[in-house]
Image (cartoon, helix red, strand yellow):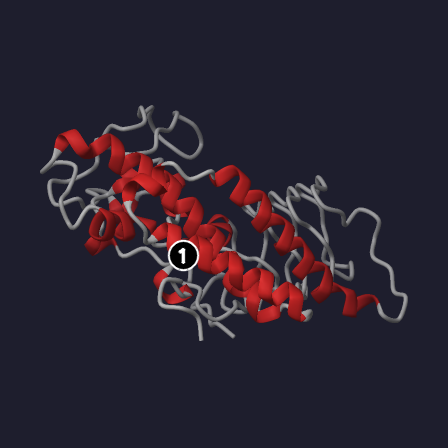
Amino acid sequence: MQPAAVPGRDELHPDYSNCFALCCTAFGFSRSADFALDKPAGTPCPNLAADFSCGIHDRLRPRGFRGCTVFDCFGAGQAVSQGLFDGVSWRDKPDGRSAMFAAFKIMRQLHEMLWYLAEAEERAFDPETGTAVQELRLAIGSAAKGPLPGLLALDSGTLHQRVRQVLVEVSEEVRAAYFAAGDELDERLQPAADLAGVNLRTLRLCGADLRGACLIAADLRGTDLTAVDLLGADLRDARLEGADLSRALYLTQPQLNSARGNSETRLPGGFEIPANWHGDQDRGETWTA
């Protein structure tokens, strides 16, 4: 059992009812295919309502705010709003807004690391690696629930490197079993590979390391992505209809939100069905495995 200081994956989902719309204020964005206008960091989105809800939430994509439908804070919003700032909003206390927004940016990084580490702990084979994962989870969990000054002074860059190293180690352990018989993968399947728009349906993918790969609009329909390392992979508009991601490595909600799927797409437990997967003629209710 994990110490109480470590948030479980059930706590690493956004709870909009307990957040002061930090993603709509802290971050800036530029007019692009993902956003319909320019917004400086630290300023409220013009679509933000007085109660911190979004005035166009049910029509974000048609109105040009696709980026909002992809983003996920991993529960950092409510952790900062209710935990670090005791339910006092940046509107109620304007002089605290800079600290709140800075804390949110750091907290999101920590919660994303905790999301990955929770999976790494479940899938690690080597006891020493498992212990390293547990220690990192405890350290990050303590920092996330600690006092505000400590959070703002945190060296998140160094912490990120430590987490990355242990995630790679767990990935190597998990994927090694898929090559015990000497099988080889297509040489294109490499970390950081540019596979944008490539048809990957005929390739064996199980155990591939696609960490940081560009899979924009790649055709993965009907593929088995078991033990495929997707850490940081760009899945925007990737075709996942009928794909099995139920045992993929290091998948996140934002990756799914940016991709395309249907009723035959298999997802791991703990993931939400992206709202944009509904409505098209060839898309239905997606179930999880």
Who is closer to the viewer here, 206 or 78?
A: 78
Image point 47% across, 38% down: which residue?
155
Which element type, helix, strand or loop, lies under badge 1?
helix
Image point 36% across, 62% down: which residue?
5
Question: Is residue 239 at least partly visible in the picture?
Answer: yes
Q: Is residue 141 above or below residue 94?
A: below
Who is closer to the viewer here, 264 or 73?
A: 73
Q: Quadrant of residue 180?
A: bottom right
Q: Is residue 210 above or below residue 283?
A: above
Q: Is residue 19 above or below residue 38?
A: below
Image point 21% across, 33% down: which residue?
97
Image point 16% across, 37% down: which residue?
90
Question: Is residue 244 at least partly visible in the picture?
Answer: no
Furthest residue toward right: 182
Characterize the local packing of mark 1: few (<14), some (14-19) or many (20 or more) Cα atoms within 10 angstroms: many
Measured as percent of width and height from the top left, residue 34 is found at 42, 35
Compared across the picture, whether 160 is left or right of 15 comes to right
Measured as percent of width and height from the top left, residue 76 is found at 33, 50
The amino acid type, in three-letter code, at marker 1 is Gly
Q: Where, quadrant-wise, is the N terminus in this rendering?
A: bottom left
Judging by the rendered image, the residue that carries numbered circle 1 is 141
Compared across the picture, whether 24 is left or right of 184 comes to left
Measured as percent of width and height from the top left, residue 127 is found at 65, 71
Compared across the picture, whether 187 is left or right of 154 comes to right
Who is closer to the viewer here, 52 or 74?
A: 74
